[in-house]
Image (tube, grey):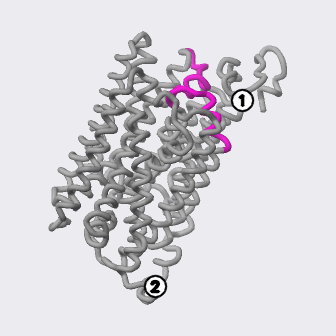
Amino acid sequence: MALTGVSPLFIGTVVVYFLVILGIGYYGYIRTTDEEDFLVAGREIGPVVGGATLSATQMSAGTLVGTFGIHYLLGFGFIWIWPGLWAGWIVSLLLVAPQMRRFGRVTVPDFIAVRYGDDGANGNYSRAIGAILIVIAYTVYLSAQVTGGGIIFQSILGLDPEIGIITMALIAVFYTSIGGMRASILTDFVQAIIMAVAVVIALPLSFTFVGGLGTVNAIFQSFNPSFVGQALSTQEIVGFMAAFGFSIAAAPYEITRIYSMKDEKTVRQAIGITLIFQSIIGTSVALLAIYMRIMFPALSNPDLASVIMSLNVLGPILGALLVCAIFSAILSTVDSVMIVSGAGLAHDIYVQLFNPDASERQKVWANRIAIAILGLIPLALALNRGLVGDLVQLIVVLQASMMGAMFFMPLVLGLHWRRATTAGGVAGMIFGFSTVVIWHVGTEILSYIPESLAGYDPVIPGVIVSFIVMVTISYATKKPSPESLAPFFDNVVSVDGGSDSDQDT
C-alpha cells in the first residue's frame, strides 16, 4: 500500500532525525579506542540513560509497528503481554541483572564460559555453543526489525516492500558497525524520549480526531465484544506473557546494556525507570491502535496502522515525530542485537577461540566486520517471511520464545544453584532452543503437534524441557569445580574437602 502526497516538511523532519542519529554514530566511532569501549561503552552509563536504553532496546518494531498492528486487529486483549514483560523485568531485578553486573564481563557467553567452564577446554566449547545459539535466534529477531522498517519505507515513499527491507537493513548495518555501544546507548536515550513524547502527544489529537468520548463509546458498542474485552484465549495470553517474561529476564542484548552501567545500584534504578517508560508507551500504543481501528477500519495490513496514523492524523511535524519514534524503536533494537550477535562471532568465537592475542584494533574491527556480515543474513528471512511468520509482532514472539527457553534456566540456576554443572547448563540451552524450534515447526509449518497442545507458546514446553534436562543431567554428572563457582558464590568449598551440603544448595 503506497501512500502519496507526503509533505516535504514531513520528509525533512525525518531526514534531520537520521542525520542526528548518524552524527551520534560518528561520535561513537571517534570515541571508541578498544573492544570494551565498543561493546560496553567503558561501563560509564548512569541510571537515567540506562533506563532509557533498556526501554528503547526492548521497544522495537515489535512495539510501534507489531504491537500497534496486533491491537488494531484484536483490540485491548493483547495488552496482557505487558504484565508478562514487566514480570520478566522484576525477575531480572531480583535474580539476574545485579548478579550479572557484579560479574562484569562483556557478553552472555562470557558468563557461560566461566560458570559452565568444566568442558575440558576452559569453557570455550560452552562459550561457542551459547554464541552460536544467540546468533541464530537474533537472526530471526533482526528479520522482524528490517521487515518493520521496510513497511515504513514502503508506506512513505511508495517503494516495493523488498526495496524498503533492503534499504533498512543497509542503513542499520552501516550505523551500527561504526558506532559501537557508546553511540548505541546515546541514541537509545534520544530515541526513548522521542517514543514517549510522540505517543503521549498523539493520544489527545487522535481522541479529538475520532469525535470525542461519545463517538468512541458508540462505535465500540457496534464492535465485536471481544475487541474491547479478551480477544485472545487464555492459552494464547499465557503463552505471550510467558514468551516475553522469560525472554526479558535472560535477554543477551539487555544484559549487555547492564554490563555497561556503573554498578549494581545503577542497574536497579535503571530497571525502575524502564518500567515507567514502558508503562507509558504500552498504554498509549494500545489506545492509539484502537483509535486507528475506528478511523480506518479496513486496513489490508495491520502493521501499517501506526504509519498511516502519522501521515493522515497527526500533521507533518507530529506525524514525522511518530515515524521517527518508529524508526527509533527499530534502530535502538537493531544496533543492540547486531552488537550482541557480532560479539558472539567476533569476541566469543574469533578472539577467544582462534586469536586470543589479537590487538585491540583487530578486536574492534573483527566486531565491525561480524556486525556487517550478520546484519545482512536476516534479509533472506525478511524476504521469505513465511518461514518465521508474517506479522512483525509474531516474528518477535518467536525470537522471544527461543531466547527465554535457551537462557532463562541456565542463567537463573547458574547464578543461584551451586549444583548446576557444565553438562547440565549446556544441555539446558540446547534442549530449550531445540524444543522451541520443533514446536514452532510442528504448529506453524508441518502441523504434527496435536491441536490440544498447539495453542501453547513454544516457550512453555521449551523452559520446562530446559529445566528438567538441566536438573537431571546436573545430578547425573560430577559436581562443578570450585573455579566455576567462585565468581558467583560465597564460601565456595572444594568437592573433595569441606561440606558437600554447601555445594548442593
Q: CA distance from mark 1 to mark 2?
A: 58 Å
**Residue 87, located in which quarter of the rendered image?**
bottom right
* Magenta part of the chain: 94-120
Horizontal relation, residue 313 to residue 360: left or right: left
**Residue 21, located in which quarter of the rendered image?**
top left
Depth order, front residue of 174/404: 174
Residue 460, relative to residue 182: is it above or below? Answer: below
Q: Amino acid at mark 1?
A: Arg
In reply to whether residue 372 is colored magenta, the answer given is no
Report the residue marked by disc 1.
Answer: 419
Q: Nearer the viewer, mark 1 or mark 2?
A: 2
Depth order, front residue of 213/432: 213
Q: Amino acid at mark 2?
A: Leu
Residue 197, relative to residue 417: is it above or below? Answer: below
Report the residue marked by disc 2.
Answer: 213
Horizontal relation, residue 439 to residue 488: left or right: left
The quarter of the rendered structure image containing the C terminus is top right
Q: Position of residue 146 (x, y in %)?
A: 30, 48
Q: Position of residue 452 (x, y in %)?
A: 53, 63
Residue at x 50%, y 35% (from the top left corner): 256
Residue at x 35%, y 44% (from the top left corner): 142
Check disc 1: other Cα within 10 Å, few if <14, some if 14-19, many if 20+.
Answer: many
Horizontal relation, residue 89 to residue 500: left or right: left
In the picture, the disc for residue 298 is none
The quarter of the rendered structure image containing the N terminus is bottom left
Residue at x 29%, y 40% (from the top left corner): 22
Mark 1 or mark 2: name the one nearer the start of the chain: 2
Q: So how many labels did they put on this image? A: 2
SS at badge 2: helix
**Residue 85, located in which quarter of the rendered image?**
bottom right
Depth order, front residue of 497/105: 105
SS at badge 1: loop
